[in-house]
Amino acid sequence: MEDIMTFSAACEFLGITSRQMYGYTGRKLIPYYKPTGRHIYFRKSELVEFVTANRIATAAEVEAQAQQLARKPAAV
């Protein structure tokens, strides 16, 4: 059960307000559970997946990728 978090614990873990969390759940942007239809629970592992989605590459990574693409011969 250590992976299960209450609504308030999940807000604290993510560092967001309850209003923001209700926005995420209301728009179904974040996975959650309502076993009794009343209280909302989250899996910590899914919260980590949520906040680590859509990683933005660093400028150095983008530059390295651009240089790598520039070295490839053009496809004919």
Image (cartoon, rainbow, N blue to C red):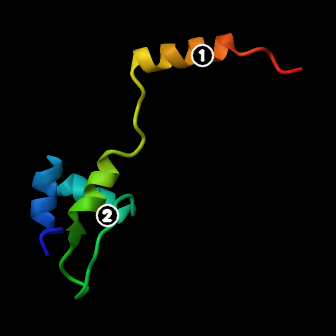
Tell whether 33 sits left or right of 9: right
Instruction: Give the residue at x 39% y 63%.
Output: 28
Q: Is 6 placed above or below 53 here?
A: below
Secondary structure found at label 1: helix
Instruction: Give the residue at x 21% y 61%.
Output: 44
- Tag shown at residue 25: 2
Q: Quadrant of the N terminus?
A: bottom left
> In terms of depth relative to the viewer, which is nearer, 75 or 46?
75
Instruction: Give the residue at x 34% y 60%.
Output: 30
Q: Position of residue 58 (x, y in %)?
A: 39, 21
Image quadrant assignment for residue 72: top right
Q: Quadrant of the C terminus?
A: top right
Q: Is 7 placed above or below 70 here?
A: below
Label whose residue precedes the other's in the sequence (2 or 1)? 2
Tell whether 23 sits left or right of 70: left
Give the farthest residue toward the right: 76
- Tag shown at residue 68: 1
